[in-house]
Image: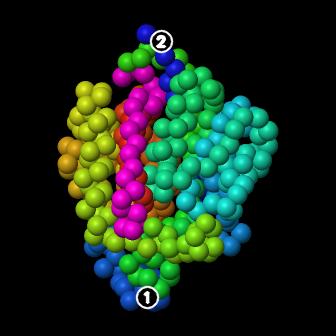
Amino acid sequence: MSILRSQVIGCGSYLPARIVTNAELAARVDTSDEWIVQRTGIRQRHIAADDEPTSVVGLKAAQDAIADAGIDASEIDLIVVATATPDHTFPATATQIQAALGITGGAAFDLQAVCSGFVFALATADKFLTTGAAKTALVIGAETFSRILDWEDRATCVLFGDGAGALVLRAVPGEGTLKDRGVLATHIRSDGRYKDKLYVDGGAGSTKTVGFLRMEGKEVFRHAVNNLAETVRHTFAETGLSGADIDWFVPHQANRRIIDATADKLGISHDHVVLTVDRHGNTSAASIPLALAEAHKDGRIKPGQLVLIEAMGGGFTWGSALIRW
């Protein structure tokens, strides 16, 4: 049976030039490199410059992905930007990137699912492409979380960084089997009962301020491992695959201990896990596409390989996707 698949044809990324090490943070708040590394695996993070709002870092990742795809930007008829740190309440950051790329057709919009945002955006774009509603999609995860951090809160300011990653997807006919290249399965979930575990204490509709990120780290950790394993098991049940079949596991880069524990639960060898958390920190919706771009560019991820992505974020939201590269 012939069906449409959302095939990855380009992958790109952008990281701001400024790097902030754990030692630099230790000079500002009561923490240490040893404390941060032991609990999170993070050693440094990138911080956007004052003239680098989310639309700018997202645009640079998009341009990199379009160049990698070898297409003209005018061929893109759908842009979905996953971000929790938009430039403005409105218009959507996606429309600013659309204009900067010189695209005047199709649709562009933002999607907000925090750290799960890229998985949600990929699942959304996949539905447009596989139903024939769009032909070529640009899916971007872009964040400037440094703008919403309380730099005096040592429990959160050491965790996050800025950056952007992007995929270009094209609707391509497939045979409807697991041998098809493209997005093979997506699963997304949310449960609003846990809002107070990870949130920003401000917003246009409530405090009329941006607010700061607040988190109950132990509770987030506890839910993360279970929720992430659950959503991937749905994918395995749907496809008949197991952890041993996965060529590359590219999880949300929030915490090394969460990544290791999830891989163990799923039976995925640590040798098949792409890790960037030590150098990028938690870049929220940008973390998965940044990791994908790194492994794509250095040749680890090869055409035809099975790539599994998953993430959990504030809300709570969580999800996974299986892609044959």
Where 18 falls versus 325 (above or below)? below
Q: Tell which of 237 and 75 is nearer to you.
A: 237
CB contact under 8 Å: marks 2 and 1: no
Give percent across and percent down for residue 282.
44, 63
The residue depicted at 39 percent of the width and 71 percent of the height is 215
Give percent across and percent down for residue 240.
25, 27
* Mark-to-mark CA distance, 2 and 1: 58 Å
Where 165 falls versus 47 (above or below)? above
**Quarter assignment of residue 34:** bottom left
Looking at the rendered structure, the kind of residue marked 2 is Ser
Which residue is label 1 attached to?
A: 29
Query: Is residue 11 visible in this depiction of the protein?
Result: no
Q: What element carries label 1?
A: loop
Looking at the rendered structure, the kind of residue marked 1 is Val
The residue depicted at 29 percent of the width and 63 percent of the height is 221
Q: What element carries label 2?
A: loop
Is residue 69 part of the magenta span, yes or no?
A: no
Disc 2: CA contacts within 10 A as few (<14), some (14-19) or many (>=20)? few
Where 207 falls versus 26 (above or below)? above
Q: Quadrant of the C terminus?
A: top left
Q: Which of marks 2 and 1 is in front?
A: 2
For residue 229, which numbered disc appears in the image? Answer: none
Give percent across and percent down for residue 198.
40, 66
Which residue is label 2 attached to?
A: 2
The residue depicted at 63 percent of the width and 28 percent of the height is 134
Q: Tell which of 74 and 198 is nearer to you.
A: 198
Q: Tell which of 2 and 302 is nearer to you.
A: 2
The residue depicted at 44 percent of the width and 82 percent of the height is 153
**Quarter assignment of residue 78:** top right
**Quarter assignment of residue 146:** bottom right
- Range shown magenta: 178-198
